[in-house]
Image (tube, rainbow, N blue to C red):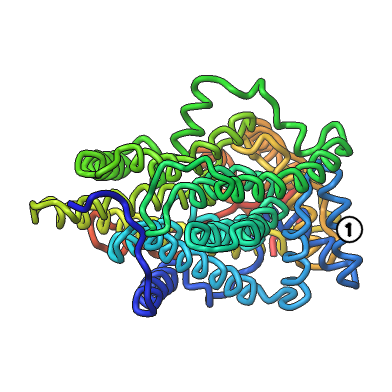
Amino acid sequence: MPPGPVAGRPGPTTYALILVVVALSAGVVYRPWLDAPFEMTDFGEFLPILRHTATFVGRYSALSRYYGAQGRYYPLALLALDAKWAVFGLNVVGWQLARAITMIAVGTLLGTLLVRLGANTRAAVLAALLVVVGRGAVPLWLKVHLSDPLGMLFVVSSAMLATALPTTRRPWPVAMAAAAPLAAAVLTKETFVAAAPFVVLVGLGRDADGAWRVPSRDRRSLAPAVGVASALVITGVLLVMHHTGASAGGYSSNYRLSSVTLSHTASVAGNMFLPWAPRPFGVTNAVYAAVVLFGWLAMARHARSRLAVLVAALAAVALPAAGTAVYLPWAIVAPYYAGPFLIGGALMLAMALTAIDGSRSRVIRIGASAAIAMLCLADGAAARRASDTFRAQRSLDASVATSLAALAGRGTMVTAATDHPIGLYTGRMAAYGRAILDAPFPPVREQPCEVAHMLARTGRTLVLVYGGECGAAWTDVARPSRALRRLFSYVSFTTATLRPDSVRADIWLPSGAPRS
């Protein structure tokens, strides 16, 4: 067993291995070269702005005004969104490939960072796969408009620069250089402020030989803290200025301390600390937690300095812990919120596997790595199914929009959406339909399933029901006027068989309306 967590010096072979494994895994799981329309959920909001504003500056200004009214300030994310539209326009494959390249870069740099922080190559490769197949990572690959991947790239770059602090003769310039990408991450998405403790601990917690240590109290140790603090003060002033100018009912108004409850805290913490699918408190995460706990206890038992191990543990825990604190006042718990904080989970896992590799028992060494490899395979299969489902859903949404646009003027569409009490279809379906089709669109209003069921029976208005929204099929209603289906197949990890699946939507036209 090694005396404690000691940093390595990754060479070209290590870089190449991490890159190849991450890129091949991503290609098999997500296949970003396959075409499908833009998704409805978020593109319905800003696609009209992108499509109907002629210039780069005009689009950026319009996007800034729109999100500024919501209390959001992430100028680098909007610049990236504007730039991708300027390059790719409606070419969705271009957007997907750009996202894949960004995430592959994040995984490769993360694996390299893990080696620099003391992990061996095998442990770093397995841990880096968290940003490919982890529960929080999957939406970041699929939702090409999200700014989190760019912010993650900035955070990992900041930490990589911070690893040079123990050996440099010019700590202040290096500290400021490490703080700059962190500031960029915060200007990409406000919640990346939670990465500050992680970057500071990476800069302070290692000696010139690369070993973890208790931070000293000399002037040199002030550099990373001052650099990060300066970056946060500057970006924090900008964030506060824009938040205070938000409208009363804006997006950021939902960020409040009244959302903090015991059950909500457990949900947020589980989302951040337990990264494997399908849910935080399940068998896969129990295996992950057991491997991490065993590895860190082994490291502490055999290390020369247990305080140094504690510093390494604090650095690993800093990201998910700070992420929990940042998202506690937010009422919604979405898997992708945890995506950026997988960096901390990857460090916890990589250091644990490295410590276990120092065990005298071959069974323990092989068993731990095999268990994590199986988790990667299981989550990879789940991510592949999620990717195929998402692609089919996007195709279905576009078909629904096309069908409804053709029916403009024949009645009012009623959407049964009891699972989405936030106006998902009311505003976004109409905006999405107008944006992708550049044509008139019928008015949209939501109704509970019971009301929509009654309207479908009376045949007085147009009714749309997505499959699964209203439970069992309506057997007492005439067959839908249009039944839209998108079929796909997925590989079941448990049975190793190919299984069919589908997404669907049914449309009932008003009585007397043409059926074709």
Horizontal and vertical percent for residue 365?
Answer: 15, 55
In the displayed structure, does residue 165 sit left or right of residue 190?
Answer: left
Instruction: State whether residue 159 appears in this view.
Output: yes
In the rendered image of this protein, does residue 87 appear above or below residue 314? below
Element at badge 1?
Answer: helix
In the rendered image of this protein, does residue 272 appear above or below residue 206? above
Badge 1 crowding class, 10 Å Cα cut-off, few under 14, some 14 to 19, many 20 or more, is some
Horizontal and vertical percent for residue 134?
Answer: 42, 53
- Residue shown at 30% from the left, 38% from the top: 306
Name the residue that disc number 1 marks.
62
- Residue shown at 68% from the left, 32% from the top: 451
- Residue shown at 62% from the left, 35% from the top: 418
In the rendered image of this protein, does residue 315 appear above or below residue 27? above
In the displayed structure, does residue 302 sit left or right of residue 347?
Answer: left
Q: Amino acid at mark 1?
A: Ala
Horizontal and vertical percent for residue 415?
Answer: 69, 43
Horizontal and vertical percent for residue 391?
Answer: 54, 64
